[in-house]
Amino acid sequence: MARESKARKGSGKSKRTRAQVPPVRRAWRWFMRRLALVVAVPFVLLFVLVLLFSFLDPPTTHTIWSEKRRLGDIDRQWIGIEEVAPSAVRAVVAAEDANYCLHWGFDVDAIRDALEDGGNRGASTISQQTVKNVFLWQGRSWFRKALEALITPVAEAVWSKRRMLEIYLNVAEFDEGVFGIDAAAYHYFGVPPKQLTPMQGALLAGVLPNPKNRSASRPTGNQRKRAARIADGAATIAADGRAACFED
């Protein structure tokens, strides 16, 4: 009997202790649990999308959607990377991210060079640009850059380099309302991307990442010189193995 009575007293004390938790603390715990849920859900959904896009093609992007809304229509057709002339694929890499096969999403050397240059040159890799185009929006805000920095390693971990580049080639803008290298090849040269010559591929790569102020079919003298350098760079990365990660 004595033991039973003691047990009851202990149980009552436990109930009173729980009941005596201050309302402010209970409210704070409730708020933190809800906040954790609100923060976690978008990241879980994002990870699911990254997984899905490893084998499903992204149906649209914020930029494509906004341009279609502004212009009324856009020119775009998704194609596999194997349907693009290899020299054109190498030209895009040589122009935008020559060390694409050597980094895990961020080119530390390019970032260091950009900082030493006072921030006057870009240091975004193809991986970062792909993440920005597919999941985020255009702009230079620190918030967007922070999200880009968080998502890029996830995409790098899930997608192969070849898949990453394939997505980039299909969502990059090559002229106003012209998205993807298939639409760009027909738009500028009237040929399918498989038939692009090395110089045509270099001219297409040369309009990136500022397509609204450049034309691959009506290049300026400086654009022609840059295209020649890009074509040389494409041949170089083919020779030294820096194209191995995205070629069969």
Image (tube, rainbow, N blue to C red):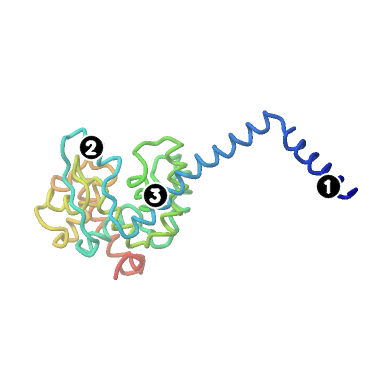
**Who comes first in sequence, dot 3 or dot 2?**
2
Report the quarter where the C terminus lies: bottom left
Q: Are marks 1 and 3 in contact (CB under 8 Å)?
A: no
Instruction: Give the residue at x 19% y 61%.
Output: 198
Q: From the viewer's side, name the closer residue of 30 and 12.
A: 12
Between marks 1 and 3 in the image, the one whose residue lies nearer the viewer: 1
Where does label 3 land, which residue? Answer: 128
Name the spot of residue 242 as percent of width and height, x first. 36, 65
Q: Residue furthest right?
A: 2
Q: Are marks 3 and 2 in contact (CB under 8 Å)?
A: no
* CA distance separating discs 1 and 2: 72 Å
Where does label 1 land, which residue? Answer: 7
Q: Are marks 1 and 2 in contact (CB under 8 Å)?
A: no
Q: Secondary structure at mark 2?
A: helix
Q: Amino acid at mark 3?
A: Gln
Q: Specify the quadrant of the image occupied by residue 78.
A: bottom left
Residue count near mark 3 (Cα–Cα under 10 Å), binned few <14, some 14–19, many ≥20:
many
Residue count near mark 2 (Cα–Cα under 10 Å), binned few <14, some 14–19, many ≥20:
some
